[in-house]
Each structure stands twice: as C-alpha cells, then as structure tokens.
Image (cartoon, grey):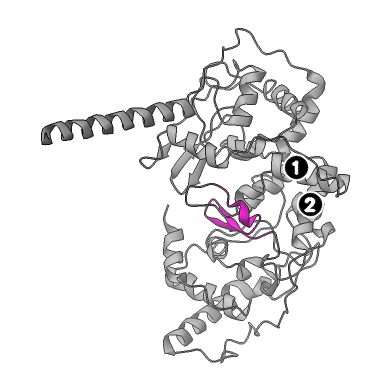
C-alpha cells in the first residue's frame, strides 16, 4: 500500500511537471516567420521620417559600438542579471535583419520576438516600442532596411543562471508587456500628447527614470520616480526631482537638445547619448517631449540654496563634525575640493564661459544615490569624440578614501543634505569593472 502511494505521488509530480512544461512552451513558443528571398521593398518617401524616429528612439545608442559601423550592434548592456549584447540591425542578410519582412520587424518591436521565433531579452525596450503607430513602424522599417549592410555576428550574452533561459522572458512579458494601442489624452494639448507619445513609445524615458521591480520590470506605481542606467542614478522626473533649481520648459528643451541649460549641470554618463540623439531629431518633437516631462517636474518643490563655504580658505570648517573621524574626513574633502575643484567651480558659469557650474546647483550632490557623483569625480565629463561640448577632467587617481571624503564633503556643504548611507561601500562597488 505504501509503495503504491509513493508511486502515485511520483506520477502526480511528473504529471504536474508535464503540465508546467507544456504551459511554459505554450507561453513562450512563437513560430519562425519566412525569410525574405530578395531585398525588402520599402517606401523611400518614409526615410526622413524613419531617421527622425530612430533618433527619438535612441536606436544608435544601443546598437552602435563602433561609430564607423552604425547599427552593427555589439554594445554591452548591463542589467542586474548580467550583460546583454545588442545585435546587428543593419540589412545584412546573414547576421543582421536583411531577410526580415515588415511583419517580422513589427513583431520584434511589439512583442519582443525575433524572426526565427526566439524571445528577445527586455533590455531591448519593446515594451515601449509596442505603442508605436503603424505608420511609424513602417517608416522605421524603411529606414533600417536602407542602411549600409554590415556583417557583424551577435555576441553571446553573459547572464547568470537561470536568467539566460529564454522561457523566463515569456513570464516577464505576461507581467509587464502591455501591447494595447497608444491613446491620446483629449484633456491635453496636441503638443503635450505628442510629447507623451515620444516619451513612452519612442524615447522610453521611463526605462531609466522609473524604478524597477525585483524581476526587472518597471514599477508603474512609481512613474518617473528615479531609476538607473549603466550604473548611474537616473534622477526622478516628478515631484521627487532632486534638482536644486526648478526647471523651466524652455531650459528643459535646451538641455535635451544640447546637454546644458542655465542653472543646471551638464549632461553626463548615459544622458550624453540621449542628448546626442535628440540633438539631431526634429526640434518640434524635442520641444513636445520637454512640454510633457515639464508637466511632471512642475510638481517638484523649490529648494533653498545656501552659500558654499569659501573654498579658497581651507581653515576651520563652517560646522562641527560629529566625531574626530568625521572631522578628519571633512577636512580631507575640503582640501580635495580646494585643490581639485574650486578653480573651476568657484568661478561661476555663464553661457559662453569656460568655467563650471557652482556645485551647489549640481544635481548629483542632491541625488538620493551617490553613484552619479562618484562616476563624475572619477571619469569626468567628456564630449563624444569629435564633438564640441563642456569638458571636465576625471580624477581616477584619487583613492577610494579620497573619493569618499570628497563626496561626503560636497554632500554636506554643497547640498546641505544628510549623508548618503553606505557611501564608502558604494565607492568601492562603483570601481569594480
């Protein structure tokens, strides 16, 4: 009798596993679509529109590792689960999308499914592109199918087990992929609606500026509440914006196009790629995006700004430290500021000057997360190769203790804010390759 019960339990367990396997297969399975046997026929009148859409969608940022080989892929995209490498989206028939039909292209953009039926990892933001209008999808297809065909085989991804198992993507899609059509808000202006469409269906702003759940999906209950991109903190774009000065719509539009605006820090880190792409897009679309985002930022409270301690006088600090160790750290941070930062940042900045932003106005000091400031201290801010722009040297020769002291000093006496918890550990973590 006991043996019979054990056998029945084994049979029940096997049956359950079979059902789960069948369910997983049903959820993930997608048929391969027939390859094109000749070059795609496209409407060339759509090319200018497609080029603008590709810039608004930041396609080159993720799919161009080598500027001499545009859209050939190979860009490493870091995720909490490992590294995903972008693929070749040029019309090369063997290693790119040259034998993809419009149907295959659209399925990838809306559902995250490659022509051969493989599920694409959501590092590719198809959960945003799924909202694209049909005509815009056709224009993007026409644009990419007329680029220079480049041979570039896909690099293997480096994902920790079990995240490299593509069936898991099907469950992710069931939780986070909303493929309902984009709808305008009749209560808002035409420009606001255009900006909302650009922000969500193309520029995928929420992908960086919205927190993510433990499964890597967007936490839609906290829209634009701050996130991360490439190890940098992406600040909140809503009432929780850490910006020390309020944004005007005009300044935001200027910043999105050229990466600098009065009273605000220059674009750095992943935002430089965004500015590079938006700077080549239609100005009206960027203005519309600024109008939409500014609607969120208007909710942010203004902050009081106090004078920065005199950097040229490295004498007694303006406020007592809590203990001897903190006092020593503040003194070191003050010394580093006066020797490495004050020459530029105490001079004040005008639109055409070569001097830097007063650090009280630098958003990285006010962020709830210190990573962006740490990256800026170490890496500096360098314009893309061959392009003009604001430049700041990096100080990678500083030790972890020096970076920690400088960041702590700037946080306290620049932002007049509470210390970042775990700053020393964060400094160590950000140095890891």
Numbered circles on residues, count:
2
Position of residue 41 relative to residue 108, above or below, is: above
**Secondary element at image label 1:** helix
Task: Compare marks 1 and 2 and give the one earlier in the sequence.
Answer: 1
Q: Position of residue 149 (x, y in %)?
A: 61, 20
Q: Position of residue 253 (x, y in %)?
A: 80, 53
Q: Which residues are magenta?
A: 217-237
Closest to the observer, 205 or 315:
205
Determine whether label 1 and label 2 are within 8 Å by CB: yes
- Verify whether residue 222 appears in magenta: yes
Q: Residue at x 75, y 42 (%)?
A: 198
Quarter of the image holding residue 100? Answer: top right
Residue 402 seen in this snapshot: yes
Where in the figure is residue 128, as x and y percent of width and height?
Answer: 65, 39
Give the class, few, some or many, for how many residues have Cα within 10 Å of label 1's Cα (few <14, many ≥20): many
User: Which image quadrant: the N terminus?
Assistant: top left
Residue placed farthest to the right in the image?
Answer: 189
Q: Is residue 66 above or below residue 396?
A: above
- The image quarter containing residue 360 is bottom right
Image position, residue 244 (x, y; %)? 70, 71
Task: Label 2: state its secondary structure.
Answer: helix
Which residue sits at x=58%, y=56%?
Answer: 227
Based on the displayed image, in which of its 4 quarters is residue 304 positioned?
bottom right
Q: Nearer the viewer, residue 85 or 193?
A: 193
- For label 1, the residue is 198
Q: Seen in the image, is 257 located left or right of residue 18?
A: right
Q: Nearer the viewer, residue 107 or 97?
A: 107
> Is residue 194 in the magenta section?
no
Q: Which residue is mark 2?
A: 292
**Residue drawn 37% across and 40% down?**
162
Residue shown at the point (54%, 52%) measured from the top left: 212
Along the horizontal axis of the image, is 165 left or right of 95? left
């Amino acid at each position: 009798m006991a043996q019979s019960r054990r056998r029945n339990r084994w049979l029940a367990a096997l049956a359950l596993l079979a059902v789960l396997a069948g369910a997983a297969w049903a959820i993930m399975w997608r048929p391969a679509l027939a390859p094109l046997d000749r070059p795609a026929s496209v409407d060339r009148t759509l090319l200018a529109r497609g080029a603008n859409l590709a810039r608004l969608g930041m396609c080159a940022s993720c799919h161009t590792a080598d500027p001499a080989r545009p859209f050939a892929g190979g860009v490493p995209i870091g995720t909490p689960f490992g590294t995903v490498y972008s693929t070749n989206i040029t019309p090369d028939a063997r290693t790119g999308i040259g034998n993809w039909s419009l149907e295959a292209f659209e399925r990838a953009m809306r559902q995250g499914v490659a022509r051969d039926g493989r599920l694409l990892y959501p590092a590719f933001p198809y959960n945003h592109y799924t909202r694209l209008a049909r005509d815009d999808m056709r224009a993007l297809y026409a644009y990419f199918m007329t680029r220079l065909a480049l041979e570039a085989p896909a690099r293997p991804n480096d994902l920790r087990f079990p995240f490299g198992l593509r069936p898991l993507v099907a469950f992710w899609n069931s939780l986070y992929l909303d493929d309902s059509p984009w709808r305008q808000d009749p209560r808002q202006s035409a420009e606001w609606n255009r900006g909302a469409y650009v922000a969500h269906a193309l520029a995928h702003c929420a992908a960086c500026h919205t927190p993510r759940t433990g499964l890597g999906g967007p936490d839609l209950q906290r829209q634009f509440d701050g996130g991360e991109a490439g190890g940098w903190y992406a600040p909140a774009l809503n009432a929780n914006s850490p910006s020390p000065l309020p944004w005007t719509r005009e300044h935001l539009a200027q910043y999105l196009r050229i990466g600098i605006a009065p009273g605000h820090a220059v674009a750095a880190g992943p935002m430089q790629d965004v500015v590079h792409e938006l700077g080549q897009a239609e100005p009206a679309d960027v203005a519309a995006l600024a109008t939409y985002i500014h609607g969120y930022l208007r909710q942010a409270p203004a902050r009081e700004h106090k004078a920065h301690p005199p950097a040229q006088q490295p004498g007694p600090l303006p406020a007592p430290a809590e203990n001897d160790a903190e006092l020593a750290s503040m003194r070191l941070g003050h010394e580093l500021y006066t020797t490495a930062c004050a020459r530029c940042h105490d001079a004040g900045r005008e639109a055409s000057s070569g001097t830097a932003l007063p650090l009280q106005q630098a958003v990285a000091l006010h962020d709830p997360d210190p990573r962006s400031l740490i990256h800026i201290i170490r890496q500096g801010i360098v314009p893309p190769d061959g392009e003009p722009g604001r430049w700041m040297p990096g100080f990678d020769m500083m030790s972890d203790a020096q970076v920690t002291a400088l960041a702590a000093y700037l946080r306290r006496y620049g932002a007049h804010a509470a210390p970042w918890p775990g700053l020393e550990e964060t400094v160590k973590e950000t140095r890891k390759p």
